[in-house]
Image: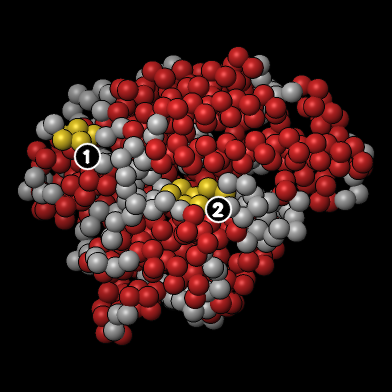
Amino acid sequence: MKERSQAFIHFYEETFKPLFKELNEAAWKAEITGKEEDYKRVEELNFKISSMLANSKNFEELKQIFEKKEEINDSTIRREIEILYHVYLSHQIDTLLQHKIIALETAIAKTFNTFRAEVDGKQLTDNQIEDILSSSTNNDELKKVWLAHKSIGRQIENDLRELVRLRNEAAKRLGFKNYHDMSLRLSEQDPEEIERIFDELDSLTREPFIKLKSTMDKILAKRYGVTPEELMPWHYQNRYFQEAPKIYKLDLDNYYKGKDVVVLTKDFFTSIGLDVEDILKRSDLYEKQGKSQHAFCLDVDNEGDIRVLCNIKDNYKWMNTMLHELGHAVYEKYISMDLPYVLREPAHTFTTEAIAMLFGRLASNAGWMKDMLGLSDEEASKISNDAYLYLQLEQLVFSRWSQVMYRFEKSMYENPDQDLNKQWWDLVEKYQMIKKPSGRNEPDWATKIHIATSPCYYHNYLLGELLASQLHAFICKNIIKKESFDVSYVGRTEIGNYLKKYVFAPGALYHWNTMIEKATGEKLTSKYYAEQFIKGL
């Protein structure tokens, strides 16, 4: 059985590795150019890989090995077989169905990446939309801009509904309840456990959020010259109310105005022993026509070619985003190259999100800002409490938004024929506590790119926040030996060494909860998140 396993793994590497690299190179090019021919190439390569993984003869061999994996006395090879089985299983659908799914995914991604909202005959980028929503006090302008962004919903809706049906059809053919159920199970997550965690977090955050939102609404109502009851979605300074509005006197943007966000990012990671210079050289960091307006990290080949795409501005959001994306990048970079190719992946998608969030949070950390921006002790002390309150508000706002995304996707895949427009706003009103505009019946759910291009993924962001707090608590107690909300990591190479050894290097060698337990002494828990952001509210 061990010999059969090794033979299959060798075959997989020989056939998959070159296709995987070629696909990622093509995807990178498409995301930057937005050109039709580049997206066509991505579609072709995706289909080629899917066809390879769908081969029934190869899957039957893998399945036989998987079912007798306990006979393999090498734990590393056994782990490779477990991962490959999940990868292959998700592709065991007929070629025509797979081609339909890939074609729709590619078309939708292209629409999103090339879309620009139009206001008064002028096209606006996502950065410009966000700038207006966060800075304008003109109610008519805010509404007009918010509605303009939502116009992409109608362009996407029909294709996205069809894509959901096709994904469900594929999942059901493989014996799963629906695509959402399949996605969690094949990523080694128990749907019931995820539901329990989200219910627990709803309970933990509901009352604190109500308290903070009451304060927020009074401040925003005064800013916009309306009553709290008259506040609408466009008054919350973000397209989805997924980020904290600026309700405190502290304006973090002021501290990053005129600063080189790239240099700050490079210097910080260097200071903790994580070199990112090679990553930055391969990256594409500024706005250009046709380019994706979002941000992501891409490991092109699992062999060191790691890149980041951003659309940097000199503000807090993009400082946070750069630290976040380079967090993903250092995780990928420092996965041990001694591991076999199949295991050169993060332990789970949410564990790499945790590292990204651990570093992203530093952008609003007064201690970090003092060390990186050269603030005086007096200035750092002055902003310390407000900086924490901002981060606390940001966490609670994001937590409630994540509830909407997780529960909407779960519901959508359970019943894609329901009134999704209504379901979206029912959840927004319940968890984010903002009102649907009177009489609105538009596919606002279809405007969120993740629902189309990163399906059943969003819950991992919130799990990542839990792990980020767990890692931070461990670092403070055992490495820095100082427990403070504004502790700075700057210059502490011990932190980089700890993460490299216990989180990054193991890659996917262990199940994600085993890795977490080895790294922190405990399995994943929400208690540190609660202690960091909810305690005292």
Residue 96 spot, x, y in % from top left? 60, 14
Q: Which of 156 and 284 is in front in this view?
A: 284
Q: Can residue 440 be seen in this view?
A: yes
Give, as a three-letter code, the residue at label 2. Answer: Ile
Residue 485 drawn at (x, y percent): 41, 72
Count of numbered tags: 2
Point 11% across, 53% down: residue: 223
Q: Which residue carries the number 1 mark? A: 124
| Figure colour scheme | secondary structure
**Alpha-carbon distance for marks 1 and 2?**
30 Å
Tell me which amino acid carries mark 1.
Leu
- At which x and y percent is residue 71? 92, 42
Residue 521 appears in view: no
Numbered circle sitting on residue 306:
2
Cβ–Cβ under 8 Å for marks 1 and 2: no
Residue 288 horizontal/vertical position (percent): 32, 44
Q: In this view, does 487 lie above or below 21?
A: below
Badge 2 local density, few (<14 within 10 Å), some, or many (20+)?
Answer: many
Q: Nearest to the eye among marks 1 and 2: give it.
A: 2
